[in-house]
Amino acid sequence: MLCDSCGKEPAKIHYKEIKDNQVSEFHLCEKCAMEKGIYVCPECEDYPCVRIKKLAKSEPILLHDGERIREYGLDAWIIEQEERKRAGFCYADIRCYPCEEPWD
């Protein structure tokens, strides 16, 4: 699949956007995504990469949240997080300390 924006490079970034209660799906190459300021790891086709998997060892909900972003889109995930915050959810309560995974 080619990039929706330039039509030249392979699309590696896949994301959904909600605007006026309408969900739109976009497929961009890395260059066009970065030019538009769009680059969240779960939107990359390589997600979860080795670095994310290492980080997830000390962040127990990271992969789950990433999959929700992929399934529902970043905008919907942010709305969900705002609702979780209002309900009293706190990420610090579930984090594993200390993080002993090296950042290669």
Image: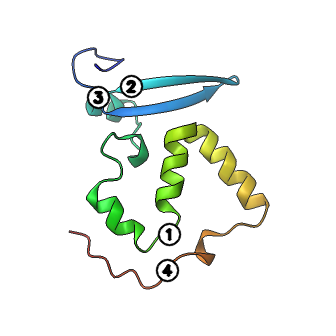
Residue displayed at 34% across by 26% down: 28
Graded by Cα atoms within 10 Å as few (under 14), some (14 to 19) or many (20 or more), the crowding at tag 4 reads few
Badge 4 amino acid: Cys
Marks 4 & 1, CB-CB < 8 Å contact: yes
Residue displayed at 30% across by 27% down: 11
Marks 4 and 1, how far apart in space?
A: 7 Å
Q: Quarter of the image holding residue 53?
A: bottom left
Marks 2 & 1, CB-CB < 8 Å contact: no
Of the two numbered discs 3 and 1 on the same chain, state the one appearing first in sequence: 3
Q: Nearer the viewer, mark 3 or mark 4?
A: 4
Front position in the image: 62 or 35: 62
Marker disc for residue 60: 1
Task: Describe the element under mark 1 as helix, strand or loop.
Answer: loop
- For label 4, the residue is 96
Badge 3 amino acid: Cys
Q: Nearer the viewer, mark 3 or mark 1?
A: 1
From the top left corner, tell me how far across and down residue 75 is, in percent. 60, 38
Task: Judge whether residue 73 can be spotted in this image.
Answer: no
Marks 3 & 1, CB-CB < 8 Å contact: no
From the top left corner, tell me how far across and down residue 63 is, in percent. 46, 58
Task: Judge whether residue 7 can be spotted in this image.
Answer: yes
Of the two numbered discs 4 and 2 on the same chain, state the one appearing first in sequence: 2
Badge 2 amino acid: His
Marker disc for residue 27: 2
Marks 4 and 2, how far apart in space?
A: 34 Å
Of the two numbered discs 2 and 1 on the same chain, state the one appearing first in sequence: 2
- For label 3, the residue is 29
Q: Quarter of the image holding residue 13?
A: top left
